Image (cartoon, grey):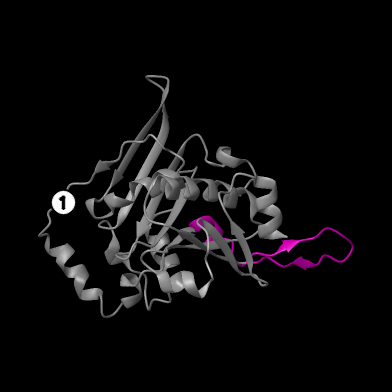
Amino acid sequence: MANSGLSSIPEQFKGIALFTPAGDVIYAIDANKQRRWHSDLCVALQELLGLTEPPHFLVPFYTATIDRWWDAHTQQLRVVAELHPLVQKYQALLNVIFQMPDVVWQLMPWQADAPELQMIETYRDHFPALWEEQNLIVAYEQWQNRGQDLVLLGDAPTPAVVHNYVLRLFVSGDNTLTERTLQQLHELLEVSLPGPYSLKVIDIYKHPEMAEQDHITAIPTLIRVSPTPKRRIVGEFTDPQRFIELLVG
C-alpha cells in the first residue's frame, strides 16, 4: 500500500467488511469495485482463525458495505453505506477503517426471528473461534500480500524478509480517547509498516489479566509482539516519525 496517508483511500471505491459474532473484522477497499467480494473475506477469515471451511453463513448478517462514486449528473461524489443491524455497534470502527468519519450508515432490512439468523447459532460448536473474542482488525490487502517477497535490485537478486507484524493495543473502555487512538494508529500502520499486520485491541477493564501479564501501567499502550524483540509504545501516537522508529526499527 502506498505511503500516502489518508490519500491511500481512493476517491472512488467499494469497501466491504466481514465481522465475526465475537467482533473480529476483516475488510477490503477496492478501487476497481469488482475484485473483492464477501466470499474472498470468508476465505481469508478461514485461514486467520484456522477454520475448517470458509464461514459463508456470516453473510449478510455480519457485514457492512460502502460505495463512493462520482455522480456525473450532480457532478458530486456520492456515498452509500449499509450495514446489518447485528454490526451496527461497530459504526465508529467502520468510519475509521474506511476513513469516512461523517458517513451515515443505513441499516439493512431484517427480521429478528429470521430462520437464517437462528441457523447461524447451530454453527457455534463447529466454528468456536468465531465466537471467541480475538479483537482482530485485518486489512484484506495486507493479508493477501503476506507471503510475497520483496526483491532487492542487483547482480544477484536476494529476497528481503517481509515480517508479519502482530500488535496488541491496550485501551480503557469504548470512549472518545479510544476512538481517536484507533484512528491515529490505523493511519500510521497503513503508511509505515513494510509488511502485513494483525491488531488485537484489548480493553483493560474487560481483560485485566492480560494487562497484568504485559505489565501495562499507562493507556494507551501498543506492544509489538512479533517480530521479536518486543517493542512497547506508550501514549498517544502524535509523533509519526518517532512512532515508526520505535515500531519498525
Which is the main secondary structure of the residues drawn in magenta?
loop
Q: Does residue 51 show up?
A: yes
Badge 1: residue crowd in 10 Å (few <14, some 14–19, many ≥20): few
Q: Does residue 46 show up?
A: no
Q: Residue furthest left?
A: 113
**Magenta stretch encompasses residue 185:** no
Image side of residue 189 versus residue 110, left or right: right
Residue 215 screen position, x and y as percent: 54, 70
Quadrant in the picture for residue 96: top left
Residue 126 vertical position relative to residue 175 in the rendered view, above or below: below
Instruction: Please tell me which residue is depicted at 64% across the width and 56% down the height of the picture.
Output: 193
Q: Residue furthest right?
A: 155
Residue 204 screen position, x and y as percent: 42, 64
Residue 136 vertical position relative to residue 3 in the rendered view, above or below: below
Residue 246 screen position, x and y as percent: 68, 58
Image side of residue 50 versus residue 124, left or right: right
Residue wearing tag 1: 110
Residue 128 vertical position relative to residue 199 in the rendered view, above or below: below
- How many labels were placed on the picture? 1
Q: What's the magenta region?
A: 139-163
Q: Residue furthest top?
A: 74
Q: Amino acid at mark 1?
A: Trp
Is label 1 in a helix, a strand or a loop? loop
Instruction: Please tell me which residue is depicted at 33% across the width and 51% down the height of the picture.
Output: 90
**Magenta stretch encompasses residue 160:** yes
Residue 173 vertical position relative to residue 115 in the rendered view, above or below: above
- Tell me the quarter of the image containing the C terminus: bottom right
Instruction: Please tell me which residue is depicted at 36% across the width and 69% down the height of the picture.
Output: 133
Quadrant in the picture for residue 152: bottom right
Residue 54 screen position, x and y as percent: 37, 70
Instruction: Please tell me which residue is depicted at 37% across the width and 42% down the height of the picture.
Output: 66
